[in-house]
Image: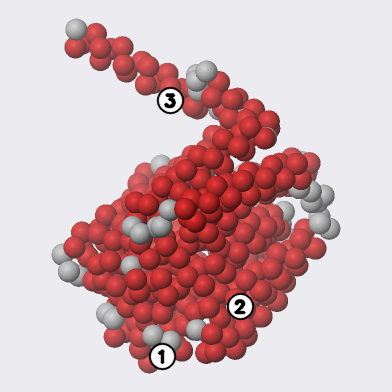
Amino acid sequence: MILWKESYIMPSSNNIIHRIMQIEQLRRQSIVTLSTTILLTAIGFLSTMYFAHSVGESVLGSYFLFLAYFNTLTLILDGGLGGAAVKRISEGREKNEYFTTVFVLRIFLVGVSIIILLFARPILENVDQSGMYSWLFIALIIGIFWNSVSNGNYGSGKVGLNQTCGFISSAGCTVFQVIAVYLGFGANGLAGGFIFGMIAATVIGFHYLDLRFKRFNTEHLKSIFSYSFWIFLASSGSLVFSYADTIIIGQFLETADVGIYRVAFQFTTAATFTTLAMKTVLFPKVSNWNANGELKMAENAFAKGITYSLLLAVPVFAGGIILGDKMLYFFYGEGFARGTQTFYVLLAVQLVNVFMFLQTMYLNALNHPKESFKVTAVAATANIALDFMLIPILGILGAAVATLITMILNSLLAYLALKRMIHVRLEYQEIKNIAIATITMGLGVGCYRILVPLSNIWLTLIPIILGAILYVLLLLKLDSNIRSEIIQIGKQIGLQ
């Protein structure tokens, strides 16, 4: 009987996997990417909640500063090479040569980053005192191999594999960090876990990497530099939005303020699940469509990408406005509730991010990195100026306001540039349905909060769960396109 059951179950499992693989590639990759993004973010939220209660705002602030400086130095180390590698490899010609070119250049640039780090030690006092300084060297070296393997797989069209490796990196990082914090290693345990995750993902990603080292020539260098130069400049602007505010807060305010700001910022990223999935999946596709003159495909994908990005961003914004203060208080602790106003503003930032992310990604994928740089440079410059003006006056709220203003500017400029290249359109009926479902959900959650005092974490979770169920049911009722999409995917994997 046992043997019979095993032989029955195994074919069934294989059959399900086979059916999943029969799903159209873009849909399948979107599902994989979205699923891993949601799982990763959930793990990140839960671990951050544990760290917030275990080590407090100051230790978390030190770790967030470590990440800010690491990513800033990684930009110099990368020099736009990662984006150029993905672009050239995704075009399908001389992939091995471009992969080798970028890897060799990275080896050279890591030395530049380390030299900068050595000279910058006097101004990195807040990082040095927390014990994070030495970890930066190790992280930069490991980052060379992790980024090379990741870009190689991503450029080769292995979006699902790349997302899986990203999941392994984040999950491995989190497991290590939780154990280290439990054992009392504090900020050092957080930094060590970050590096451990990169090592684990690199080893696994390399095993499935099809690209190999191959001799390259000056033409490959010229091709990489012609694209990477503008990607580097555009990435500089993106980095400003991501980390300039953190670094400036660290200079003007306390490390604890950095912790509160970054926790609030991380919490709002729940609104970007689908946006990040769309951005990740669409870039190599749009690049390929552009190379083959299939711009109509890219235009249709853009409209669909905006719709699916707003599916989550809009209801998260509404729910966060209604319940944000209680969520920060119960999920992270009393000290983090001081960031409630900042949290509200950052929710609006993530809503604008839907348009900014996809529009600038399209500019790069359509082989116009110069245009992407121009619009991002203007907004990034304004962001730094506003940070210096508003943070000393308004504290972390000033950083959030500066980001919102300049994100709107970036989105508008990117739209003006993109509409000269493709027909930019939106699915207005679908967006209207999202708005109606969100408003109805908001009214329901608002009534719950008025009638039921949110005195503990469980009473706070109830309206979140009920609101999510109400929103999904309403949206499926209102939007036949989304309903049909789910039915089609269900049929492809054998579900009725």
| Sequence-wise first label, 3 or 2 | 3
Residue annotated with mark 3: 17
The residue closer to the viewer here, 46 or 459, is: 459
| Sequence-wise first label, 1 or 3 | 3
Residue at image position (38%, 92%) is: 122
The residue closer to the viewer here, 342 or 186, is: 342
Q: Position of residue 375 (x, y in %)?
A: 72, 70
Q: Position of residue 405 (x, y in %)?
A: 66, 74
Vertical position of residue 290 compared to residue 231: above or below: above
- What type is the residue that disc 2 sits on? Ala
How many discs mark residues in the rendered view? 3
Q: Single out the mark in the foreground, 1 or 2.
A: 2
- Distance between mark 1 and mark 3 Cα atoms: 53 Å
- Distance between mark 1 and mark 2 Cα atoms: 24 Å
Q: Secondary structure at mark 1?
A: helix
- Distance between mark 3 and mark 2 Cα atoms: 47 Å
Q: Secondary structure at mark 2?
A: helix
Residue at image position (30%, 53%) is: 172
Q: Which mark is residue 123?
A: 1
- What type is the residue that disc 1 sits on? Ile
- Residue closest to the far bottom: 122
Label 1–label 2 contact, CB within 8 A? no
Left or right of residue 286: residue 453: left
Residue at image position (43%, 87%) is: 253
Residue annotated with mark 2: 402
Left or right of residue 359: residue 150: left
| Sequence-wise first label, 1 or 2 | 1
